[in-house]
Each structure stands twice: as C-alpha cells, then as structure tokens.
Image (spheres, rainbow, N blue to C red):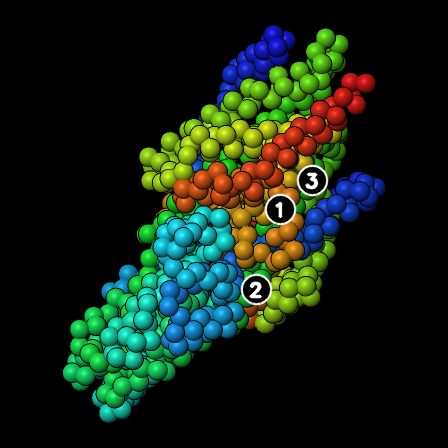
C-alpha cells in the first residue's frame, strides 16, 4: 500500500508541475461545457418564413399576424410572387413558405373552406416535421377563431390552446399536453448531463493514454520495472490520481451545470458518483491499455482520439440511440460511453433509482473488471 | 521547375512505399461514412407509446388502433389505470426505465362524453428528457387525435382551412439525406489535415528539413510539392464517399456531379492547406497532430452545421462557425445533392473556400520564409 502511495504521489507531482496538463484538466472542461452546450442544440425558434399572399385581405393578414406573433416564426419576406419564394428556398434563406391563394377570404366567407400551402425546406430532416406541426397548429387555431367570428356556431378543429367557449353540443376532444421532466423543452437540460460524461471521458482516456507512453519515451519505464512494485500496484498507482482528478472534474462540471445551466438534479448524487467511479475505471483502463500497446505519445494520442471520435458519435450523446439503424443500436451496447450517458441523464433529469439503472450499471461494472484485467495483462507482457 | 518535379517524385515515393499508411488514409473516410451514416440520425419513428385506458370504449379503441397504425408510434404497453395495484407512478416508471417515450391517457367514459357533446379529455404526457422527441410525440399525437375528431365531429357552419404541405428537397425527411453530405465534409477534413500536418514536422524531426532548405527549392515550391500528392489521394477519398452516399445511402444527386467533384477538390485543398500551416508552425509531430485534431475535429463536428443547425446557436458561435471550412462545404454539398443548385447560387460559398485556401497557403509559405532566416 505504501508503495502505491509513493508512486501515486509522484504522479500527482507530475500533473501539478506540468502547467499544460493542469490547464487541460481544469480549464478545458469548463470551456468545453460552455461551448458545447450552446453549440449542440436542435432547438427550433425563429424559423425564417416567407409569405406569399395573393389574397391580401383582412383574413389573410390575420393569419400572417398569427404566424408572426407565435414566437416560432420570423417573417423575413413577403410578396405575391411564388418564384421569389422559391428562389429564397433554394438560396437557403428561408425554411418555410406560407402560400395564401387569391380566393382565400371569399372562399371562407362563402363555403367555410379555405386552403393554404406550406412548403418546408426538409433539407433539415426531423426539424421540418416540427416546423410543419407548429404551422398547422396556428392555422387550425385560426380556423376556430374565424368560425367563432363568422358564425356563432361551432368551428371544427381546435388545438389545445384555442378558446373552446363558443362550442357547445359538438362532439369534440380536448387535448392537454404535458412534457414530463423538461416542461420548457430546454435542450441544455438534455445536453449538459451527457456533456459531463464526454468531459470525464476525454480527460480520463487522454491523460492515461499518454501516461505510460511518456514513461516509455523518457526511458523511465525501465526504472519502474526493476523496482519491487508488482504490476497490480503499478497500475493502481498510475490510475489512482487520475481517478481522483476525473471525479474532481465531475464535481466542477456538476456545480456549473446546476448554477449556470439550471440543470435539475433529481436523483441521488451518491449513485451518480458511484457510477462515475466505476465508469472512470473503464475510461482510464482503456487509456492505459492504449498506452501499453503503442510506443510513442503521438501514437497514443492518435489512437485515443480516433477511438473517442467513434465512442462519442455513437453514444447517443448528440443524436438519440433510438434513431440509429438497428444493427448500430446493438453495436453501441459495447460502447461504455453510451451506458454512462444513459445513466447520467436518467439520474439527473428523470430522478431514476438504482433499480431503474441496474442494467447499464451492471454492464459498466463488468467492463471495469474486464478492461482493467486486460490492461494489467498487456502491461505484464512488457515487463516479462 | 525541375526541382519541383523532383520533390513531387520524392513525396510520391514516400507515400507509395508506406503501403499500410496509404491504405489506412484512403479507407478511413470510407469506413467512417458507413459507420456514422447509420449511427447519426434523428428520425423519430416507432416511438414507444403507453396507453392508459381505464374504461375501453368505441372511441378509445378506435383511437388506439389509429395510433398503432402509424409508423411514428408503436404501442409499448397498455395500462388500465393510473392508480392500479402497480401504483400511480406507473407511467413514470415506464419513462424512467426507458420503456415508454410518451403516454396517451384517456379519461373514463370517452365515448359517452364525445357522443353527448361534452368535451372528452385526453392527456398526452411525453418524456421530454430529449426535448426533440418530446415535441415530435406531441405533434404527431395531436395529428392523430385531430384527424379522428374531424371525421367524427362534423357539424354545420364551421370554418375549415386545409393545409397542404410540401416537404421540399427531402420529401420523406430521410435522415441520411441530411447527414451524409455533412458527414462527407467531416471525414474529409480530418483525414486531409492530418495527412499534411505531419509531413513538414516529420522532415524537421528526422533532420532532413535542412537539406530541403538548402536545396534550390523556393518555399512555395516546397509547399506545393507537399500538398499536391495528397490532393490526389484526397480526391480518391472524395470519389469514394460520393459513391457511398449514392449507392449505400441512396442520397440523391440532383445537381451536377462535376461541380460536386470540383467543390470537393477545393475543400480538400483547404483542409490540406490548414494541415500544412499547422505543420509549418509547429516543431514536433506530436504538437502538430494535437493541433490538427483539436483544430479540426471538434469544430467540424460541432460548428459546421453537420449535426446541429447553425441557426439554433447563439451569435458568438454563429460568428465563429464562419471560419470553419467545413461549414461552407456542408452547405455546398447539401445544396448540390439535395436541391440541385448550381454555381449561380453557390458562388458565395465557393468564393469563401477559395479565399481560405489562398490565405492558408500564403500563410504557410510566409511561415517558411521566417524559418529560412
């Protein structure tokens, strides 16, 4: 035990003395958290909208006003020319074109029927669906409003926010929507817990991957090999300071998440740190394993960056696991980052209990043992 | 000119002799596009839906089958009560274990109320941990319910505005159409800037830089000699990823292939120039690699608009994204492939890329001068 502590102390001194590493450990995470949480968002607001109004009546103007005032759309242009609208769509300046045909008002007054057309730039994939549904809701609500104005009787379609007062005796369904765990649909509450995981992973894996490779480059590994340290002790002493650092980073990250981003902490912190402790063993062992495989720090960096690239993009951190192709979903079960991301979100945002996360947690635990054993075995080969 | 030809030949030998590296750098982009192409998607379909239906009747059964019939939803579990023996937190439990992503809760006596004109209440609860899924579930569930209401609740005198929707450029809203063109930019930047990032530093570390410097080669010739061979390799990668996009992911190519290839080549040139600048400015391969990784990977992943739309970012990041070369190429690649636009619309992006290449190459030649003194 004393030997472990001696070597661990040497490691701590290495880290503290090297300004660059210290900055990497303390400043980088904070910077990353701020940049990433702002960059990584699918939030849809202020959709640039172009209006083609061929009707130009109070009814069509009313609809346009509803769009402008909804908060989801920003009207950037208006004309009576479809070609101009098309041009703007092609240029990518607008995402939505609302076309109101010439007989809009007269048709509504005469037949109680109107048509509008929405063209969505679906280049943007799933966002297009949400844009469309916002737009349809506005149109439907407007229909209800008009119905009440033209006719004291009922109107047909109501979105949940419409005023149901003038409707009596008509078969209808009132829908209420509640967004559980994230009432305001704040994207940061979703991203920040995942980013904390990314942060811990980067620090853990990068630092430990460089570690033994550096000793190899400097030639000091030979010296360590002739000391009476066993390989278990050696690995433990290497990992311990980094493990503590990783947890420290998590503390910093959590404080920022809570104070700056207002991320809820609904579950048990003890459970979170317990999981982090297990997960860090995985992350550090992967780094250490890479470190034993390669000869130079440069190779270590290259390999760990490449692996991390795949790990992060396939972890469900940026894009949901449920959307991935089915075979990728199975492959991603092998990805430890995926499990910790799942756990972090479940614990912080949903307030999950131990029972809810037992599956990913046990997978992580198995990994921790397996990869640590692998790293130790790999290292012993080199001492032999 | 003869000297330049000599240098080109030397570089070519370097690259061709190291077969393993050659294979790795041409294959990596192709493999990455396959893996990430299947992984990076945001389609929301087959959403796991929980139904809470205390007293099933004609209305709730009809609505349930309508939910089941859509591609968006699959009914994951049907509960009879929120306060059954299994407890009031049932829906919550399903959410916490990830077994349901949304819940539709009917009140008892739906059919009765609906028939008599009393509002029949439905509560939609979404697991908004992932806000995007939350809004999509809300939107599609509302559509299903409103369609039912329209068909069964017709009454005279109401106003109905029909919205016809056209999803332009990507009618099925296929995720791969959105992400694969962006992915091309991502994998091409990283590999190209890495390739050149280590070439000059390798010469410095192995001590052959002095030999290069005392040779009659001018700085710009050295830069050209270093960049040109990799441009050829990069072009092979461009061909590879475009072929993949077409054949594996069925991304349409509505515009001109020639233009796409040209823009691809230009983009590779910018990335290679970035690598060579890093290489000229740094002393060791290790630092050069770090620079190339940090300088290209994270910004390209996050600030190019390849995954996350740039419009959604706050203005400082939007401004910053302008100096990321991939940001411009993502726009170009998507526009050519999905919208079929030509140079008349894309001249601005092209100009920016050209300018970037010029600035980066000039800067690298400059940094070279300094070292000569």
Which mark, by number, is residue B222? 3
Left or right, B119 with reference to B348: left
- Looking at this view, name the residue that lies furthest to the bottom: A110
Front in this rendered view, residue A254 or A40: A254
Q: Chain of mark 2?
A: B
Q: Position of residue A296 (x, y in %)?
A: 71, 26
Number of the front mark, 1 or 2: 1
The residue beneath circle 1 is A333
Quarter of the image with the C terminus of chain B is top right
Estimate the x, y position of residue A50 in percent, counting from the top left.
35, 70
The answer to whether residue A109 is left or right of residue B80 is left
Q: Residue B177: which numbered mark, if any?
A: 2
Residues marked 1 and 2 touching at CB (< 8 Å): no
Rendering coords of residue A88 (x, y %):
41, 70
The residue sitting at the right extreme is: B17
What separation in Å lies between label 3 and label 1 (alpha carbons)? 48 Å
**Can residue A63 be seen in this snapshot?**
no
The answer to whether marks 3 and 2 sit on the same chain is yes
Q: Secondary structure at mark 2?
A: helix
Question: Which quadrant would residue B134 be assigned to in this image?
Answer: bottom left
Q: What SS does tag 3 mark?
A: helix
Q: At x 37% / y 33%, what residue is drawn? A: A256
Instruction: Rate crowding at label 2 as few (under 14), some (14 to 19) or many (20 or more) other CA atoms within 10 Å.
Output: many
């Amino acid at each position: 035990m004393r030997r472990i502590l001696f070597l661990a102390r040497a490691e701590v001194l290495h880290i503290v003395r090297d300004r660059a590493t210290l900055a990497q450990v303390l400043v980088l995470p904070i910077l990353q958290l701020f940049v990433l949480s702002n960059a990584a968002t699918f939030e849809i607001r202020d959709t640039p909208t172009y209006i083609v109004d061929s009707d130009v009546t109070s009814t069509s103007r009313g609809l346009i006003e509803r769009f402008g005032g909804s908060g989801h759309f920003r009207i950037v242009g208006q004309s009576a020319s479809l070609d101009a609208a098309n041009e703007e769509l092609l240029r990518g300046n607008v995402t939505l074109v609302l076309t109101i045909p010439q007989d809009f008002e007269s048709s509504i007054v005469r037949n109680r029927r109107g048509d509008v057309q929405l063209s969505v730039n679906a280049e943007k994939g799933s966002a297009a669906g949400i844009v469309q549904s916002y737009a349809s809701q506005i149109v439907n609500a407007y229909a209800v409003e008009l119905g009440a104005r033209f006719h004291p009787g009922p109107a047909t379609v109501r979105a949940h926010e419409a005023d149901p007062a003038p409707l009596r005796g008509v078969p209808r369904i009132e829908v209420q929507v509640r967004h559980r765990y994230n009432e305001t649909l704040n994207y940061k509450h979703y991203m920040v817990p995942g980013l904390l995981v990314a942060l811990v992973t980067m620090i853990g894996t990068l630092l430990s991957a460089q570690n033994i490779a550096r000793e190899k480059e400097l030639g000091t590994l030979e010296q360590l090999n002739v000391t009476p340290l066993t390989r278990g002790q050696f690995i433990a002493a290497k990992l311990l300071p980094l493990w503590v650092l990783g947890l420290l980073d998590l503390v910093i990250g959590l404080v920022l998440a809570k104070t700056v981003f207002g991320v809820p902490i609904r579950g048990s912190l003890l459970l979170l740190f317990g999981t982090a402790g297990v997960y860090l063993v995985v992350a550090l062992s992967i780094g250490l394993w890479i470190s034993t495989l390669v000869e130079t720090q440069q190779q270590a960096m290259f390999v760990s960056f490449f692996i991390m690239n795949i790990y992060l993009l396939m972890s469900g951190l940026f894009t949901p696991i449920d959307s991935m192709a089915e075979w990728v979903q199975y492959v991603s079960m092998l990805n430890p980052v995926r499990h910790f991301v799942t756990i972090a979100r479940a614990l912080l945002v949903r307030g999950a209990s131990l029972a809810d996360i037992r599956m990913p947690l046990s997978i992580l635990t198995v990994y921790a043992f397996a990869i640590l054993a692998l790293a130790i075995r790999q290292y012993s080969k080199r001492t032999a | 000119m003869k000297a330049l030809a000599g240098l080109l030949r030397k570089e070519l030998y370097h690259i061709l002799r190291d077969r393993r590296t050659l294979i790795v750098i041409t294959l990596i982009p192709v493999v990455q596009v396959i893996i990430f192409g299947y992984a990076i998607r945001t389609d929301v379909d087959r959403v796991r839906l929980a139904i809470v239906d205390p007293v099933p009747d004609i209305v709730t059964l009809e609505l349930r089958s309508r939910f089941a019939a859509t591609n968006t939803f699959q009914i994951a579990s049907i509960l009879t009560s929120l306060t059954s023996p299994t407890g009031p937190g049932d829906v919550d439990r399903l959410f916490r274990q990830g077994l349901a992503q949304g819940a539709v809760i009917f009140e008892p006596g739906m059919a009765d109320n609906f028939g008599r004109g009393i509002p029949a209440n439905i509560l939609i609860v979404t697991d908004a941990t992932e806000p995007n899924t939350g809004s999509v579930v809300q939107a599609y569930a509302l559509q299903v319910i409103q369609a039912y209401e329209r068909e069964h609740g017709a009454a005279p005198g109401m106003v109905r505005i029909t919205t016809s929707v056209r999803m332009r450029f990507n009618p099925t809203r296929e995720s791969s159409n959105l992400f694969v063109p962006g992915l091309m930019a991502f994998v091409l930047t990283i590999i190209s800037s890495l390739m050149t990032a280590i070439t000059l530093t390798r010469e410095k570390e192995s001590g052959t830089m002095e030999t290069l410097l005392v040779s009659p080669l001018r700085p710009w010739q050295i830069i050209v000699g270093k960049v040109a061979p990799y441009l050829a390799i990069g072009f092979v990668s461009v061909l590879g990823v475009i072929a993949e996009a077409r054949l594996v992911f069925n991304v349409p190519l509505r515009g001109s292939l020639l233009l796409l290839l040209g823009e691809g080549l230009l983009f590779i040139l910018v990335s290679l120039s970035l690598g060579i600048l890093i290489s000229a400015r740094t002393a060791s391969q290790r630092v050069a690699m770090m620079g190339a990784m940090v300088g290209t990977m994270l910004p390209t992943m996050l600030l190019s608009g390849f995954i996350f739309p740039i419009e959604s970012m706050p203005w400082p990041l939007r401004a910053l994204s302008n100096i990321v070369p991939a940001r411009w190429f993502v726009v170009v690649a998507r526009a050519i492939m999905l919208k079929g636009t030509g140079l008349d619309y894309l001249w601005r992006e092209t100009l920016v890329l050209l300018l970037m290449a010029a600035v980066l190459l000039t800067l690298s030649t400059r940094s070279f001068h300094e070292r000569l003194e």
